Image (cartoon, rainbow, N blue to C red):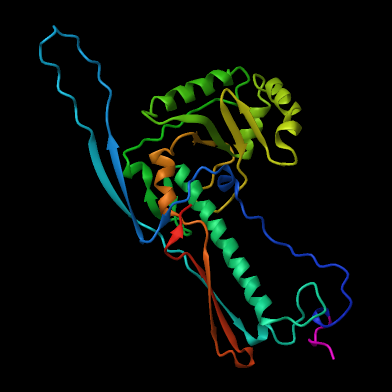
Amino acid sequence: MPLSNDARFGVQAMTEAVNALPVTPTQIRDLQLFKPVYLSTTYVNVEEQEGQLNLVQSKERGSQGDPSISRTRKMKSFKIPHLPKDDVVLAEDVQNIRGFGTTQAQTVESTVNDKLADMKSDLEYTREHLALGALQGLILDANGDVLFDLNAEFGLTRTPQSWALGNDGTKVGGKIDQTITALRKKLKGEMVSKWVCLCGAEFMEKLKYHDSIKALYERYRDGATYREGSLNHISFEHNGVQFIQYDGEFGTDADIATNKGSSCHWVRVKPLLSISRLLTCLLRSIPRLWRITLAVRNYSMTKVGLCMLNPMPCL
């Protein structure tokens, strides 16, 4: 007797099963810009200390020196977002259903695991969205509301740079140098070993094939097989900046416009406060799974939940 009245899901010979899953963007996570930090609280305090360099005036020996200027300190507190996800397994989700890709009956355990996997994917998708927003100074919720405005919190101003890639006569290398010079002036005591620019598809195309860059890009790609192995992503490095085409789309203002790029820093010693240090405490990376079974008799309902609990590692 078949498991279902619908022959498509009943017991029958199976040759192949195609599981069409959406691709979860992980480009920012793969860059490892954010260091995990473990917390046991639902908030994080960020202490900021700022000093300054001053020239020392020469004076006669024995005379009194100029007083040293004390460092200024500030403390900010941020509430860690709670990201819950819930679902249920009903009897009709299991009864008379064949397991995916098999000839065996669907089980409660496999159904629960599938739902947990889907919810975990949603959280990973959300984490990437939060990280993308943090790199631009504006962490947004799923509905587009602002969770944290890092630019306002730390008194930062983002200055747009126009590289005029639509103009064939633009010296793109000079534009890159000007941008990096402006960024270096804001580094203060931070040590940076690399610059990364996440680009929209149109921006990346115009950059690669600009008259002043095309030959350099073609030479760069000649050795890509030896540098990247089997990786299949669109990137280009020039003048100390790694340009990466970012393909993640979330439908919020955090998305990188197709004709724009957003720069971030690859830090060698410690992350920049304005970009990475706060996010390591605001986002938690490994969700803990929990499951509560209700009315187990006859497999009537199983409640499934997936959320981020304390203590948890930060992003």
Residue 253 seen anywhere in this rendered image of the structure: no
Q: Is residue 82 left or right of residue 98?
A: left
- Where residue 92 appears, as percent x and y from the top left, is 67, 86
Pinpoint residue 9: horizontal percent, then vertical percent: 80, 80
Residue 161's place in the image compared with 43, above or below, is above
Q: Tell me which residue sits at (68%, 21%) in the image.
A: 216
Name the residue nearer the viewer: 208 or 53. Answer: 53
Dominant secondary structure of the magenta stretch?
loop
Q: Residue furthest front?
A: 62
Q: Is residue 313 visible?
A: yes
Q: Position of residue 119 (x, y in %)?
A: 58, 67
Decide: is 27 above or below 173.
Answer: below
Q: Nearer the viewer, residue 301 or 47?
A: 47
Identify the residue at image location x=40%, y=53%.
146
Q: Nearer the viewer, residue 162 or 270?
A: 270
Q: Which residues are magenta?
A: 1-7
276 to the left or right of 6: left
The residue positioned 70% from the left and 32% from the top of the image is 227
Is 2 included in the stretch rendered in magenta?
Answer: yes
Farthest residue in the top direction?
60
* Closest to the observer, 59 or 76: 59
Q: Position of residue 243 (x, y in %)?
A: 60, 33
